[in-house]
Image (tube, helix red, strand yellow):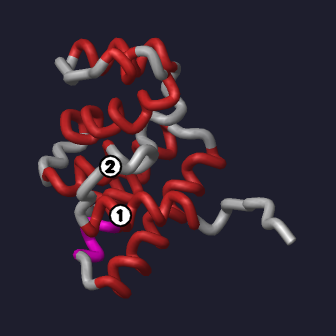
Amino acid sequence: MNQNEIFKNVLQERLTEKRYIHSLNVAESAVELARIYGADEGKAYTAGLVHDACKNMPSALQLSYMLENKVDLTDIEINTPKLYHAICGRAYVEKEFGITDEDMLNAIRYHTTGRKNMSLLEKIVFIADFISAERDYKRGT
């Protein structure tokens, strides 16, 4: 069993079915974008797959996990629980999945907020999350 298959098994246990399907879709969208823009498809797939690893964890547990793992948080981050899952997700996949690639970790960390001077992989995961197949945005006329 390869690394991504192991991650899928863990994610299936941690996430709701809807969130798990979203994660699979983001991974596939990330590969498509990586192919178009010349990024590493393997890194794009894995980062897209695990980007929401902490999404279904209660906010209090996310905060506790981040504090236990000495994640450096600003006052704004501490006071904005909607930001937790990405920050906690970075810490989680590094510790629990052994992902150490800084670019992949940053792609997970900034997939919701973005940031100045994002790497290509960060942009890919950010956009893949936005355009994943199950998203159903209302379009104006």
Q: Is residue 126 above or below residue 90?
A: below
Residue type (three-letter) at the residue carrying disc 2? Arg
Q: Circle 2 sits in a helix, a strand or a loop, which is it? A: loop
> Residue 110: x, y in percent?
34, 46
Q: Which residue is mark 1?
A: 123
Instruction: State which mark lies toward you, 2 or 1.
Output: 2
Q: Which mark is residue 62?
A: none
- Locate residue 14, reporting x and y percent: 48, 36
In whole angstroms, how far apart are the C-alphas of marks 2 and 1?
9 Å
The quadrant of the rendering that contains the C terminus is: bottom right
Tell me which corner region of the image, top left, top right, bottom left or bottom right, holds residue 63: top left
Q: Residue at x 31, y 59 (%)?
A: 122
The residue wearing badge 2 is: 115
| Earlier sequence position, callout 2 versus callout 1 | 2
Is residue 27 found inside the magenta-colored segment of the image?
no
Above or below residue 99? Residue 48 is: below
Span colored in magenta: 40-44
Q: Is residue 139 above or below residue 52?
A: below
Looking at numbered disc 1 in the image, what kind of residue is underneath it?
Answer: Lys
Residue drawn at x 57%, y 65% is 132
